[in-house]
Amino acid sequence: MAADRAYPDGLGGAVGAGRGEVFQLLRDGRPRTRAELSAETGLARSTIAERIDTLLASGLLRSADKAGSTGGRPPTMFTFNPQARVVLAADIGATHAKVALTDLTGDVLAEEERRVDLAVGPEPVLAYVTEASAALLDRTGRSVADLLGIGVGLPGPVEHSTGRPVIPPIMPGWDGFDVKNHLYDRLGVLTLVDNDVNLMALGEHKTHWPDAPNMIFVKVATGIGSGLISDGRLHRGSRGSAGDMGHVQLPHGADVTCRCGNLGCLEAVASGAAIAARLAATGVPAETSSDVVALARAGSVDAVQQIRQAGRDIGEVLATAVNLFNPSVIVVGGSLSQAGEHLIAGVREVVYRRSLPLATTELRIVQSRAGNQAGVIGAATMVIDHALSPFQLDALLDR
Amino acid sequence: MAADRAYPDGLGGAVGAGRGEVFQLLRDGRPRTRAELSAETGLARSTIAERIDTLLASGLLRSADKAGSTGGRPPTMFTFNPQARVVLAADIGATHAKVALTDLTGDVLAEEERRVDLAVGPEPVLAYVTEASAALLDRTGRSVADLLGIGVGLPGPVEHSTGRPVIPPIMPGWDGFDVKNHLYDRLGVLTLVDNDVNLMALGEHKTHWPDAPNMIFVKVATGIGSGLISDGRLHRGSRGSAGDMGHVQLPHGADVTCRCGNLGCLEAVASGAAIAARLAATGVPAETSSDVVALARAGSVDAVQQIRQAGRDIGEVLATAVNLFNPSVIVVGGSLSQAGEHLIAGVREVVYRRSLPLATTELRIVQSRAGNQAGVIGAATMVIDHALSPFQLDALLDR
């Protein structure tokens, strides 16, 4: 499908003349006076005044309350205004799609969720995204003009630079589809696309681990994947396939055929779908990852044992990941992690036994806290970090 | 040992007032006029003029030749002057230490090398580094005042922020030694310390793969280690132990005890030392990684077969690393890689069979080209990138 409008890839590539510098300081949320901004940036007072005027006009800054005044005319303080724009975030999973509207800190203002079947192809699924987007704007009283952009997570490898899925195994009809331009044609705003687990990693990192520069987020659900945060930034890899833990071969799983065609992949052994299939083969009624969780919660010893063993198998691969990547935090999320501590207990058991002592001294292995909002928060964060970065901000201000 | 002078960690933490912006542009080596610099940065002509004066005074910029003038007075061009300062780089290995002096592009101007025994402890080894440093400055007619700093690579895990080795297995007496302050006390310049393989990765990346943002460099010698480049930057991990491939357990190596105390580590099976030990056990005279290389070059079928199998074993771990990290280049270096194509052939055989198709479509697996200079070039690059970064440059100019 040809794009009606070319995506403006050159948007805002110019090196900013320091407007970025003032704004980046203020993004921490702390109000400052012109004098303080001048001192912190080294820019002349006249330059600061000009930058502030531009940022006030854009709405991205506002005057802060002059609290604590004790007479005289206190200098005006300026602060970041996270309500200046809104961001759309779509988290498209194997069975559900969630669309949210957030402010410029990634806080969710409103959201919609619906069951979707990815196999119907990209156009009907993305039609739901645009419909839900319009509904969310309407419900919150915002307009397309208020939009900073839209971030989209898809359950497969995505070439981030072009926004196209690359041979995604569970998304028939999506391979190479131009998701970015398709949505840009309909919404006319900055559109960024990434793998769903990458965005869950970003969302979890932003909301709960901003001070942990190196983190691995593992999603264990129908499939198994991970997202890597390196020095505070998402590590996507050269084709966007970084973090693909699910198709690492387990030493002892060589007799199980994976949906990818190889033998003994972690996902073929330790995913929610694999556990459900094994339970079903013994006569226990289970079809999905959620069924396995429900069984474990209902006290099924078989389900609990299988989940614990899945944790150990995932731990085998994570032990190698820990030696290679040396994170300070591993976050375990996805539906199978919601069956209590069984999964994470198995992970801990193997990682702490198998990884290097130096790499595990300060390593924490924890449950996801952002839960099922991690994906949309991550999608919004991707858009905000891009659009408000020093290189892009000028384009936004010049619009 | 107490530091005589505290290392100035606060050095140059201030946000620069744009002098950095002009200089960062010019670091690409392309000469520009004041007007071009003003257009590219958006800074006022008067500001540009002031910044250029400061940078000319520091020597970091110089006027470029006004070639191609066709009459009239052509505008002056300014260009980065890589001879303005020099950098010391020390690559301390298990058996040898190399010290080099480079310019600000990392080009080696002079170097010294000596056999060292790390087990004598840090003080005699670092005494050699300072002696060689003085000799190199003397030989090139430069002085300590010309030094931008010194970068040091050590063959073990290093906490980069403090410059201290952390439980390094082959460096008795070095654990926790304050290498950074020890050298700062003697040389009085910026001192940065890192793991030797990290620096080899940095050196190889800078000299041969600057356009490959995601790279894995594997060193196969007495031990086995790797360095990861993520989005163009070294990924050190939370304790500086990232890239530690050597102690990943191989599925089939469980009966070999590693010097780290665990069973079946890659290094215990596939390192030059492990191969030498196996050859020696069959009566072939081999003690070191270099002996193995010499045997292979002399046509020993046993040595060649062992090197090829080592490549396959390393490939097993790299296959997982490729799925997790998705590099576009794997560079294989270290002494064992110098025995011809045998090692890399084994690596390729397994990685291309075992990794995800998406991750290997554009993956190249190549021999190191920077060779035994990778470490010193990387050490110099670490210092240059740090000291000439926007945040540090002002401190340099204000000295």
Image: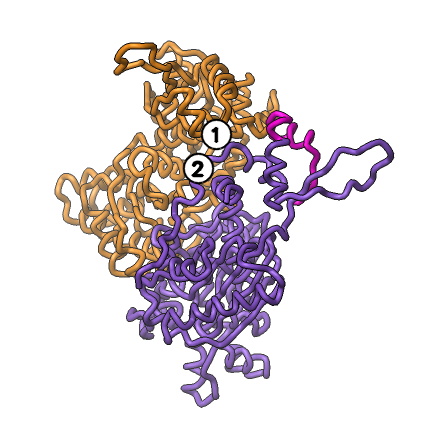
Chain colours: A purple, B orange
Depth check: give the residue in front, A258 or B153: A258
Residue at 51% x, 38% y: name it.
Answer: B159
Name the residue carrying label 2: A14
Where's residue A287, x and y in %? 45, 83
Q: Is residue B255 visible?
A: no
Where's residue B388, x and y in %? 46, 26
Magenta part of the chain? A29-48
Disc 1 packing (10 Å; few <14; some 14–19; many ≥20): some
Name the residue carrying label 1: B42
From what the image shows, is residue B55 above or below residue B366? above
Q: Quadrant of the N terminus of chain A?
A: bottom left
Q: Quadrant of residue A331?
A: bottom right
From what the image shows, is residue B90 above or below residue B156? above
Q: Quadrant of residue B374?
A: top left
Disc 2 packing (10 Å; few <14; some 14–19; many ≥20): some
Query: Which amino acid type corresponds to the residue marked 2 in the rendered image?
Result: Ala
Residue at 52% x, 35% y: name it.
Answer: B164
Where's residue B58, x and y in %? 47, 15
Q: Quadrant of residue B235?
A: top left
Q: Is residue A321 visible?
A: yes
Instruction: Point out the residue furthest to the bottom here.
Output: A283
Query: Which amino acid type corresponds to the residue marked 1 in the rendered image?
Result: Gly
The lab-note entry on whether marks 1 and 2 share a chain reads no
> Tags 1 and 2 in contact by the CB under 8 Å rule?
yes
Disc 2, SS: loop
The answer to whether B347 appears left or right of B264 in the picture is left
Instruction: Point out the residue furthest to the right here.
Output: A71
Residue at 46% x, 41% y: name it.
Answer: B157
